[in-house]
């Protein structure tokens, strides 16, 4: 199905190296079959687009220079091969993420921090479906070990919705010729993530793929609601992520 798709959002657990390797292999097969998609990166804030475009002209083939533009906090050894792939095949690279600062402003100040009044009306931001908000709040709460106060959960959920909207708008111009979005599993969910902010026609050409760790994976019927396809992988070894939050 993904072969026929014009938009392929592919998820990840950010620190799972096995998932990144699997996704890279799949993308190489997609390209070997003749596809030439744009590659959209959650790991680059949207403000970096002019710098990425400039470096591709000034330092062609220098993946390291482009990676240096990436947002802090990412393990860039996971993403460097995707940047290199884009350079090797001359694929468009899209910086799609809302910056941490802008996301925090949306969370704390509301939609006006980033979106114009006309956007708020067009997107229906002041009358979002309760199911959409609840889905994001559940994901945020679970992602923070159910240790956050409700006010913080609501703010972070709003920030995540804003990120999804910004990502959808960034990839929309590339969908006709094909685009692969590399982002966290939450962002690629077809029920609450980036795909719901595409037009119905664009959404019809999208295949959302989740890469899900086996430990604690949702039941299959839930995965079918969230993704067009879900791939279960080994769980990465990591320290207890809840320990710092408990402290």
Image (cartoon, grey):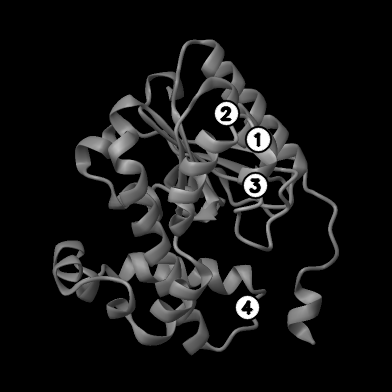
**Residue 87 numbered mark, or none:** 2
Q: Where is residue 191 in the image (x, y as percent from the top left)?
A: 38, 52
Question: Where on the picture, by quarter, is residue 146?
Answer: bottom right
Residue at mark 1 to residue at mark 2: CA–CA distance: 8 Å
> Residue reaching furthest top?
33
Give the CA distance from mark 1 to mark 3: 9 Å
Q: Quadrant of the N terminus?
A: top left
- In the structure shown, which secondary structural element does the residue marked by tag 4 occupy? loop
**Nearer the camera: disc 1 or disc 2:** 1
Q: Of helix, strand and loop, which one carries label 1?
A: loop
Asked whether 35 or 139 is in front, the reply is 35
Q: Look at mark 3 in the image and give the residue it sits on.
A: 67
* Foreground disc of the pair 1, 4: 1
Q: Which of marks 2 and 4 is nearer the N terminus?
A: 2
Locate residue 19, reporting x and y percent. 69, 39
To which residue does mark 4 refer? 146
- Cα distance, mark 2 to mark 3? 12 Å
* Mark found first going from the N terminus, 2 or 3: 3
> Which class describes the residues within 10 Å of circle 3: few (<14), some (14-19), or many (20+)?
some
Q: How far apart are labels 3 and 4 at the CA level?
A: 33 Å
Comparing marks 2 and 4, which lies closer to the viewer? 2
Residue drawn at 73 percent across, 81 percent down: 245
Task: Indicate which disc, 1 or 3, sits on the residue closer to the N terminus.
Answer: 1
Label 1 or label 4, whichever comes before in sequence order: 1
The answer to whether the residue labelled 1 contacts the one labelled 2, judged by CB atoms less than 8 Å apart, is: yes
Residue 173 image offset from top left, x and y in percent: 28, 39
Q: Nearer the viewer, mark 3 or mark 4?
A: 3
Q: Residue drawn at (50%, 34%), measured in percent from left and top?
A: 57
- SS for callout 3: helix
Position of the C terminus, as image quadrant, is: bottom right
- Number of disc labels: 4
């Amino acid at each position: 199905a993904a072969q026929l798709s014009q938009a392929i959002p592919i998820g990840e657990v950010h620190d799972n190296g096995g998932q990144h390797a699997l996704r890279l292999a799949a993308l190489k097969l997609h390209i070997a079959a003749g596809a030439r998609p744009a590659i959209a990166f959650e790991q680059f804030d949207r403000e970096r687009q002019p710098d990425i475009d400039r470096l591709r002209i000034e330092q062609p083939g220098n993946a390291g220079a482009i990676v240096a533009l990436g947002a802090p906090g990412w393990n860039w050894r996971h993403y460097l091969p995707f940047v290199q792939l884009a350079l090797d095949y001359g694929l468009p690279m899209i910086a799609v993420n809302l910056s941490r600062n802008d996301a925090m402003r949306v969370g704390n100040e509301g939609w006006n921090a980033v979106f114009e009044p006309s956007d708020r009306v067009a997107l229906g931001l002041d009358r979002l479906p309760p199911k959409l908000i609840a889905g994001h709040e559940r994901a945020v709460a679970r992602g923070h070990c159910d240790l956050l106060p409700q006010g913080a959960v609501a703010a972070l959920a709003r920030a995540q919705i804003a990120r999804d909207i910004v990502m959808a708008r960034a990839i929309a111009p590339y969908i006709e010729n094909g685009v692969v979005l590399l982002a966290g599993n939450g962002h690629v969910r077809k029920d609450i993530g980036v795909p719901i902010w595409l037009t119905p026609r664009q959404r019809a050409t999208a295949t959302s793929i989740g890469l899900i760790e086996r430990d604690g994976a949702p039941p299959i019927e839930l995965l079918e609601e969230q993704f067009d396809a879900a791939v279960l992988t080994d769980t990465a070894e990591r320290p207890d992520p809840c320990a710092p939050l408990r402290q």
